[in-house]
Structure formats: C-alpha cells, structure tokens
Amino acid sequence: MVDWDREYLSTRGIGVKLPLRSGFGRTDRIDGWWKGPTAMAAYLGIMILYSTWRGMMEADFWIFENFGRSAGYSTMAIESEGSHVLSPLFSPLIIPGQGTFGGPIPEFLWWMSPAMFILIFPAGFRGTCYYYRKAYYRAFFQQPTGCAVSKPWNEYSGETGLLVVQNLHRYFMYIALAYLPILSYDVWLSVNFHDAAHVHHYGISVGTIVLLINVLMLTGYTIGCHAFRHVIGGGSNDWTGTPMSKLKYRMWKVSTKLNEKHKEWALYSLFWVMFTDFYVYACTDPFFGWRDIVLWGGL
Ligand code: FES
C-alpha cells in the first residue's frame, strides 16, 4: 500500500490493520530475530556498566575507598620506566584541583573522577550516533522490538520531546574530532621514556601499540560518521572545479568507504576503548599483576 492510500484511509477514519500478532514478542517469524537485539543489549550493557564503574573508581567516593585513586594509587595511567600510558577514559587528564586544567575546578567538585569531566562528550557522540540509536532503541526500549514482531506498546512519536537532543549529533562529532589529536598525543607520550636523571629515550611498549590501535579505531569510527560525511560532502555541486572541491571529493570518498562499515567501526572501537582502559587498569592494580612490556628501546 502506497503512502497516499494510507493517508486517504486515515483521513476517513479507516484504520489500516497490519497482519501482526498482538502481545510482546509475538510474531509469525520463524528465524532467530531476537538473537541480535539480545546480544546487543548484553554487549552495550556490559560496556556501560564497565565504563561507569571505572569512572567512579577514580573518584573520591567512600564506597570506592579500596580501589583506585581513593585507595592511594592511581589506575588511570601506567608510569612504566618513565613513559606514560594514559587510559582513554581519562584523557585529557583533568585531576580536580591540580594542574592547568584541573586547577580552576572549584573545591566542592574535587570528589569527582577525571573521567566524569570528559566522558560526557564521547558518551554523547555514541549515544546520538545513527547506528547506536537503531541498536539501543531495539535492544533496550523495544521501539521496535523487531520487524513484524509485536512490541509492548503501540504509541510511536518519533524522535520528539526529550529525544530532540539527538539532533546534537553533529556538534558531538566536532568534539569527537578534537579527541583524535589528544589521543594521538597520548601515543606520543607513551614512546617517550625518561630515567631518574630525566635523560630521554624513545621506546615502544605493548601499551603504545594498544593506544595506537585505539586511535586508529576511533578515527575509522569518527571519519565514517554520517554527520562528518555530510559536512564534507553535503551541498557540493562540483567535485573537480577547484583544489578544495577535489580535496573534499577525496575526503568524501574515504568517509563513504568507512561509512559502509559504520556498524563494525562503532562496535569494535567501543570494545577497544574499554580494552585499552582495562589494559592500563590491569598493569597498575597489583591484584592483576600485569606489566607493560617494553618491546623496543626504553630505558
Ligand atoms: S552516525 Fe555514528 S558516529 Fe555519527
């Protein structure tokens, strides 16, 4: 049935009944339609819980006094032989009350974890991402439960009300772009070793490689963003007239290539961010006893 048919019927109060069973999860489908949303709910749920727990671990809450910074040692960065491998959940490092960035933070906020000052931006970027929206609307909100599968509620009002915040995605994308040089700088810091006398050496550790893969994964995810692709390619009528239009065309082609696999970039880059943080955590907490092995150079 085409749209104007539907419109004609609805203007005359004639409802269009789809052949759908009623009752949450009921369907005539015989394939494993529920596996994807269930796996996604588990995956995103674990990632959200882990990042929240890690972010709070480095705060000065009494409930976390046996862990992290609250317990007297930091699990945000590996200080291995003078190199500095910083977890991406805490980069750029803003320690309340300390340093250039943390110094101006008022004392009543000093209980906060460094992650709490920055995670809002990557979380906002992923939370408003076109791919993630599709994923978590289905996985968590059953909106819809699945194609041709009955959902627990009938009403659908689109992305209105509170959900207009999803329109901020483009602005989160601009901030996400700024994170790429910051995280690249962290890779650079991790290859610079300083001994006790402050003599400088270059080196590469496993942590360096883990950070580098993280930047590459996040670059693939961010450059393949629908909003980024639109910003560089949208509104262009000419791909060849000027050097700038040729450059835009090349960038648009790269973005399009990455965009075709945006789902994979979204999911794998999220995993790698969390793994990178876990690597730093495991190398700094005596409970795990991991060591950041230097592969080349160093002290
Ligand atoms: S659409 Fe996924 S990051 Fe922009």
Image (tube, helix red, strand yellow):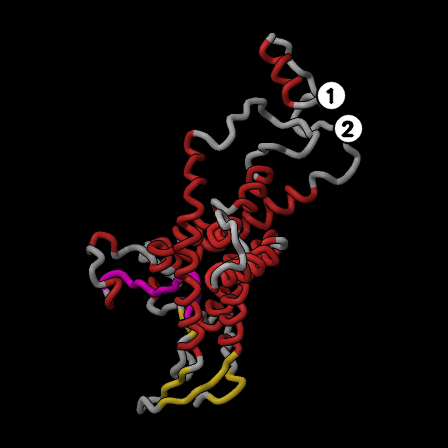
**Crowd band around label 1 with a 10 angstrom C-alpha radius: few (<14), some (14–19), many (20+):** few
Tell me the distance, in whole angstroms, between the alpha carbons under discs 2 and 1.
9 Å
Tell me the amino acid under the disc marked 2: Asp
In the image, residue 128 sits, relative to residue 65, either above or below, namely above
Residue 147 locus on image (x, y percent): 68, 33
In the rendered structure, the answer to whether residue 259 lies left or right of residue 162 reads right
Quadrant in which the N terminus is drawn:
top right
The residue at the point 63 percent across, 33 percent down is: 145
| Disc number placed over residue 28 in the picture, else none | 2
Q: Residue furthest front?
A: 241
Q: In what element is the residue under mark 1?
A: loop
Q: Earlier in the sequence, mark 2 or mark 1?
A: 1
Q: Position of residue 14 (x, y in %)?
A: 64, 10
Q: Amino acid at mark 1?
A: Pro
* Residue 154 vs residue 230, the one in the foreground: 230
Q: Nearer the viewer, residue 166 or 228?
A: 228
Q: Are marks 2 and 1 in contact (CB under 8 Å)?
A: yes
**In this rendering, is residue 224 above or below 40?**
below
Question: In this rendering, which labeled residue sits more in front, label 2 or label 1?
Answer: 1
The one of 120 and 130 positioned closer to us in this rendering: 130
The residue singled out by tag 1 in the image is: 19
Considering the numbered disc 2 on the image, is that residue within a helix, a strand or a loop?
A: loop
The residue at the point 33 percent across, 62 percent down is 70
Compared with 235, 154 (above or below) is above
Is 92 covered by the magenta stretch? yes
**Disc 1 CB within 8 Å of nearest ligand 1 atom:** no
| Span of residues in magenta | 86-97
Residue found 42% across the figure and 77% down from its top: 188
Looking at the image, the residue that sits furthest to the top is: 12
**Main secondary structure along the magenta-highlighted residues:** loop
Q: Is residue 261 above or below residue 93?
A: above
